[in-house]
Image (cartoon, rainbow, N blue to C red):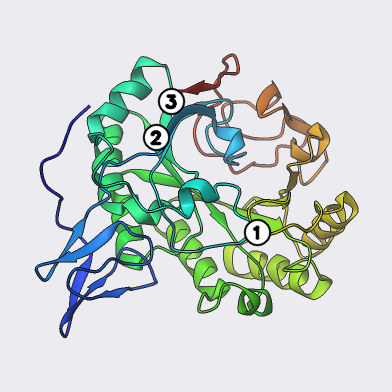
Amino acid sequence: MVYASEYPVARFQEKANTRVRCAACMRFCRIKEGGKGICGNYANVGGKLLNVGYGLLSSIESRPIEIKPFFHYWPGSSALTFSNWGCNFYCPWCQNHSISFSRPPIESNPKYAPYDLVDMAKAFGDEGLCASFNEPATQVDFLLDVFSLSSKEGLYSTAVTNGYFSRASLKALIESGCDGFSIDIKGCPKAHAKILRGVNPDALLSNAKYAIDLGAHVEMVFLVVPGFNDDEDCIRWVAERHVSMLGEEVPLHINRYYPAHKYVAPPTPIEKLLAAKKLAQESGAKFVYVGNVGLPELESTYCPTCGKLLIARSGYEVIAYNLGNDNRCPRCNTLIPLRGSNVKKEKRWRIFL
């Protein structure tokens, strides 16, 4: 563990008259002298933008990749998963609000160095690393250093994100070795207008397409929240945009919401989730999963051509794998889009911080 004596200069910043504009994400915060951006991790000190949250972590866990969720990326593997503090969105139903709605404790916490995480992942047999729990765009500078090092050590790098990176920071992350993105699509434009004002869902999908074009693996997550994005028109918009902008083979995870933080509506009815899955499939999506309900048949991968069970999952664990090294269905020879190799190991759940 390293105790840093100074804050690094943020890589993504621009002068904006008397202020500094942060370019880590598409919020593009214009920050006055002595102020901080919306996430609390970037501060204007003497006319320069500093990453004051660099290396300040709120949690470190070894977790199965399926829990992110990633179902077509290194199946059966585990990733050293870590988070810092803050967010650039403030969803009222956030399950991780205790860290996402908090500013980094700059004066009190020790700071981790990139090699601390890489060494930890190697020591505990993880195949890769994952920035998750809160929004990774809040720690772009740290991620670039971590992922560049993990790539050299033969580990994969991933991010669970709302997709609101700036194009420059997203490109830099992919170039550093981050090739897996689990991206939240919050809903259609009218849903965003209710709560997430100023955030364009098309911009998130455009970023997802940009990541795919740069060679990254992308899986989309649609949390269906009652009273926010659960009407048929909104679900249809998400499904059709998903296929038209990203393609029919990009996995779509339709997940169940549970009450959290300031949002107290009851959990999403399973019937609503199943209807959303059907609509997505009718729109052309080939790999649609229903998560947060604990039903293995809704989280397993089937051949979109012949229906054969290819990857069976239960409890975030791969329990059967019926694909060969060429990732083709053994019954009809359909190619299944996967990134990485199948990893067989016992399910693990380790918490370090």
For marks 1 and 2, the one nearer the N-term is 2
Looking at the rendered structure, the kind of residue marked 1 is Lys
Q: Which residue is mark 1?
A: 262
Q: Quadrant of residue 225?
A: bottom right
Q: CA distance from mark 1 to mark 2?
A: 35 Å
Q: Position of residue 64 (x, y in %)?
A: 56, 28
Q: Quadrant of residue 228?
A: bottom right
256 w.r.t. 185: above or below:
above
Q: Position of residue 75 (x, y in %)?
A: 58, 30
Q: Quadrant of residue 314?
A: top right
Please give left or right for residue 177 compared with residue 241 in the image.
left
Q: Position of residue 23 (x, y in %)?
A: 29, 68
Q: Which residue is mark 2?
A: 156
Q: Position of residue 26 (x, y in %)?
A: 39, 71
Q: Nearer the viewer, residue 97 or 51?
A: 97
Looking at the rendered structure, the kind of residue marked 3 is Glu
Q: Which residue is mark 3?
A: 127
